[in-house]
Image: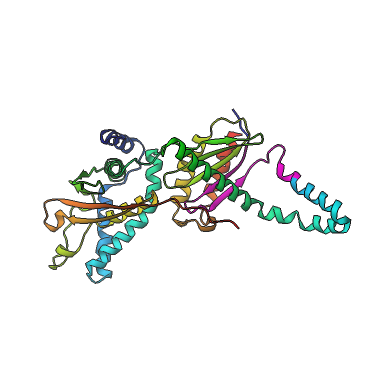
Amino acid sequence: MSASKAARVGEEIWKGRVDKVNAELVVLTYGTIVAQLCKDFDSDYVQVNKQLDKMGYNIGLRLIEDYLAKSNTMRRCSNFRETADMLAKVGFKIFLNITPTVTNWTSDNKQFSLVFEENPLADFVELPDDGRAQDELWYSNIFCGVLRGALEMVQMQVEAHFISDVLRGNDTTEMRVSLIRYIDDELPPEDD
Amino acid sequence: MPVQVYSLYIFDRHTECIYSKQWVQPATPASSTLPSTVTDQHRQTNGTELAATAAEQLPPKPRRNKGADDAKLIFGTVFSLRNMVRKLGGDDDAFISFRTAQYKLHYYETPTNLRFALLTEPGALSMRNVLHQIYINLWVEYVVKNPLSPVEHKGGEGVRNEMFELGLDKFIRGLM
């Protein structure tokens, strides 16, 4: 599917087929989760990042099925570039009503960046003012886990991490996604 | 147009049969004639006494394993056919159905490698849409979105919940 068609599909599904919740409810709920994790792990932000990624991973494992059902996807993407477009223009669109920009491809077509012009998780957010959160906490790290979980279910092993965040004072919010490998079909056990 | 639906099997990406259900027996089931001929042969070759014990012991055994064996056979068949189809027709080609004198097997596979196999009467039209609907409206709604159901359905765990069973039964009976 071409990028422009993907954008149209995403728009159409968002308008017609999706139950919506109040955006502020999402911001507050997510903010509470992150704040609680920071408390639970005693401001060990490396751990908080890890927990957010894990939560996202478990969400992704299930969310992919909802994505496939809502988008009526019957076939696999033919390459990783198409995957990236579908992810940004259909996936993010139907679940969060945003469309991050896909950019900075490596020449082997295995790595790209998602640049978030808007981030519905991060409205009204300020990172803790303890001199470390600015350098260590990736506030929206749950996204990385969601992508990892969802793509694993459609047989792509990926690695995703943030490399900049406007909350930290960077100019952009950018996530780097790399394809590690395509996972083979599992074979039935040998019968005796 | 009403259609006779015999049975449905669902396989997960680990190739395990995580759900199966039977509605109608095929008109002349080959399986019911098979055990009786086996015991007949016993009677002729081994005498009546042995045949009596064989008749007592034999039938329950196939019946107990039949469901699981059928599921394994069906998975092996559709898996091989799907791989063959992709080899011949390219990765985008999909195996849709095959037909015998007794039944027609309809196949649908999601990109997450969840596989649905539906057995109907041989004359049935394509049921691909039906399988897709089962996935979208029943599987995703009542199994995937069910917080009590685990992500992996080892041994069919979490699949046989009331909403899914009722919804599926209603949907299939609506076709017949």
Which residue ends up furthest to the front in the rendered image? Answer: B88
In the image, A158 versus A123, the foreground residue is: A158
User: Is residue A29 magenta-colored?
Assistant: no
The quarter in which the C terminus of chain B is drawn is top right
In the image, A59 versus B7, the foreground residue is: B7
Tally of marks:
0
Residue at 53 percent of width and 56 percent of height: A189
Left or right, A97 with respect to B85, comes to left
- The range drawn in magenta is B5-33
In the image, B138 versus B39, the foreground residue is: B39
Left or right, A19 with respect to B21, comes to left
Query: What is the image's colouring?
Result: rainbow
Residue at 30 percent of width and 38 percent of height: A10
The quarter in which the N terminus of chain B is drawn is top right
Identify the image quadrant of residue A90: top left
Which residue ends up furthest to the bottom in the rendered image? Answer: A42
Left or right, B50 with respect to A182, comes to right
- Residue B90 appears in the figure: yes
Above or below, comparing residue B93 to residue A128 in the picture: above
**Residue B110 horizontal/vertical position (percent):** 44, 43
**Residue B68 horizontal/vertical position (percent):** 62, 53
**Residue A191 horizontal/vertical position (percent):** 58, 56
In the image, B40 versus B169, the foreground residue is: B40
Above or below, comparing residue A130 to residue A175 in the picture: below
**Residue B49 horizontal/vertical position (percent):** 88, 58
User: Is residue B9 magenta-colored?
Assistant: yes
Which residue ends up furthest to the right in the rendered image? Answer: B48
Residue at 26 percent of width and 70 percent of height: A41
Above or below, comparing residue A32 to residue B141 in the picture: below
